[in-house]
C-alpha cells in the first residue's frame, strides 16, 4: 500500500486534506482519473439534492391548547403532517453530509481508508511522566 495525500482546494486555497491508501499496482494517472471521476460523481450527487425542501420543524407533541376550536384528531393530523415534512427536511440534510472520500472513493478493492499492513501498538509508561526526557 502507498499513501495518497489529497488536498481539497476551494478557489485555489487548501481547506481540507485526506489520506487514503492505494494498491501498489495503481499508477498515478489512474489515481488522478479515479479522483476526478469521484469528484464528478459527488458534484452530480449534490446537484441532484439542490431542490431542498423548506426548513420545517415540528414540536415534540401536538399543541392541543393552541387550537381550542379544533377536534383532537384534526390537531393531531396537522401535527403528523408537519412532523413528516420536518423528517423529510432532516433526511435531505443528512444526505447532503455524505463524506466525499468515504462514500465516493473508498472501495476496499483499490483504495482503502487505512493501510491494512499498518498496525498500532500502545506502550504504557504508567505515571513515569518525567522519564520521557531521559530516553
Image: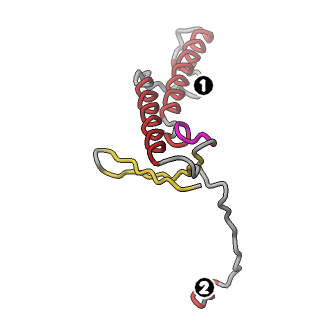
Return the residue nearer the eye: 63 or 113: 113
Which residue is located at x 67 percent, y 64 percent?
120
The structure residue drawn at horizontal position 59% and vertical position 49%, both measured from the top left corner, is 23
For the magenta stretch, what is the residue range? 103-108
Is 119 in front, or is 124?
119
Pair 1/2: label in front = 2
Residue most extreme to the left: 11
Secondary structure state at the residue bearing disc 2: helix
Return the disc, 1 or 2, that comes first in the chain's sequence.
1
Coloration mode: secondary structure
- Give the answer, above or below, for where 125 lies relative to 34: below
The image position of residue 85, as x and y in percent, is 52, 19
List the residue tagged with mark 2.
Answer: 132
Tag 1's secondary structure? loop
Magenta stretch encompasses residue 105: yes
Asked if residue 121 lies left or right of residue 40, the reply is: right
Front residue of this view, candidates 118 and 128: 118
- Res. 133 image quadrant: bottom right
User: In which quadrant of the rendered image does the C terminus lie?
Assistant: bottom right
The extreme bottom residue here reads 134
Which residue: 28% across, 44% down?
Answer: 11
**How far across and down, in percent of the image, does residue 69 sit?**
52, 9
| Front one among 18 and 2 | 2
Q: Main secondary structure of the magenta part?
A: loop
Image x and y of residue 96, in percent: 48, 32
The disc label shown at residue 61, or none: 1
Residue 46: mark in rendering: none
For residue 13, above or below residue 46: below
Disc 1 to disc 2, C-alpha distance? 57 Å
Amino acid at each position: 500500500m502507498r499513501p495518497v495525500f489529497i488536498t481539497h482546494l476551494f478557489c485555489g486555497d487548501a481547506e481540507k486534506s485526506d489520506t487514503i491508501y492505494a494498491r501498489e499496482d495503481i499508477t498515478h494517472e489512474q489515481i488522478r482519473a479515479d479522483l476526478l471521476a469521484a469528484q464528478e460523481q459527488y458534484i452530480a450527487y449534490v446537484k441532484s439534492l439542490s431542490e431542498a425542501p423548506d426548513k420545517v420543524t415540528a414540536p415534540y407533541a401536538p399543541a392541543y391548547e393552541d387550537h381550542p376550536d379544533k377536534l383532537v384528531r384534526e390537531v393531531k393530523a396537522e401535527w403528523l403532517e408537519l412532523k413528516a415534512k420536518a423528517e423529510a427536511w432532516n433526511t435531505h440534510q443528512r444526505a447532503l453530509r455524505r463524506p466525499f472520500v468515504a462514500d465516493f472513493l473508498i472501495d476496499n478493492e483499490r483504495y482503502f481508508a487505512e493501510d491494512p499492513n499498518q498496525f498500532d501498538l500502545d506502550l504504557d509508561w504508567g505515571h513515569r511522566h518525567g522519564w520521557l526526557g531521559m530516553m
